[in-house]
Image: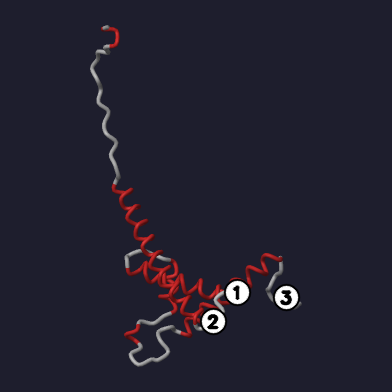
Amino acid sequence: MNDNIVIGPWVKLPKKKRGSAIEKEVMEEMKLKSFAEDITEQTCVQMIQTLHENEFDVDGTKFLRDIGFVIECIKALIYREIGLQHPMADFITLITKPMSDLPDNPEGNVDAEKLLAVTKYISDIKYEKLLNDIGVDDEDPEVS
């Protein structure tokens, strides 16, 4: 009956550390992003329902494109408020003026000149890329 007894010095394995600081930070960021997604969804669903109730074509191609942009703007606002980075936030900062600079401006804080400049810049890049993609040289021909 003594055959089943194992004698030895037992080595205790160290317990695996649960949740390193980096893992905890990643988990916290994931929770914040999930919260931001939920708030964005709730806000946008209500907005889209209100537009639909007022007979806007919420299924149209242009509407869907535009609402996608608006949703990303709302998400960027929420991310910034809870301390997260969002790529749209930089764009918003680029094309707007601080409200303190516009005390009586009924047109809001979008800087139309900056918006036009950014739009032209992006359009020029798209045009140049298109020309490069199809192999067209857009430079003026040399005159001999």
Q: Residue at x 52, y 82 (%)?
A: 116
Write down the residue under mark 2: 56
**Mark 1 = which residue?**
61
For the N terminus, the quadrant is: top left
Query: For this view, does 96 lie left or right of residue 120?
Result: left
In the picture provided, is 101 more to the left or to the right than 9? Answer: right
Q: What is the three-letter code of the residue carrying label 1?
A: Thr
SS for callout 2:
loop
Which numbered mark, 1 or 2, is in the foreground of this view?
A: 2
Label 1 packing within 10 angstroms: few (<14), some (14-19), many (20+): few
In the displayed structure image, the side of residue 136 where residue 80 appears, left or right? left
Q: Earlier in the sequence, mark 2 or mark 3?
A: 2
What distance separates the C-alpha of mark 2 from that of mark 3? 53 Å
The residue type indicated by label 3 comes to: Glu
In depth, the one of 26 and 141 nearer the eye is: 26
Left or right relative to 61: residue 72: left
- Asked whether the residues under the numbered discs 3 and 1 touch, taking CB atoms below 8 Å apart as contact, a structural biologist would say no
Q: Residue furthest right?
A: 144
Residue at image location 45% in from the left, 73% down from the top: 91
- Earlier-in-chain disc, 3 versus 1: 1
Measured Cα–Cα span from mark 3 to mark 1: 44 Å
Measuring 43% from the left and 83% from the top, which residue is drawn there? Answer: 110
- The span from disc 1 to disc 2 (Cα, nearest Å) is 12 Å
As displayed, is residue 8 above or below residue 17? above
Q: Of callouts 1 and 2, which one flags the residue occurring earlier in the amino acid sequence?
A: 2
The image position of residue 99, as x and y in percent, is 34, 84
For the C terminus, the quadrant is: bottom right
Disc 3, SS: loop
Q: Residue at x 42, y 89 (%)?
A: 107
Q: Which residue is mark 3?
A: 142
Q: Amino acid at mark 2?
A: Phe
**Horizontal and vertical percent position of residue 46:** 43, 74
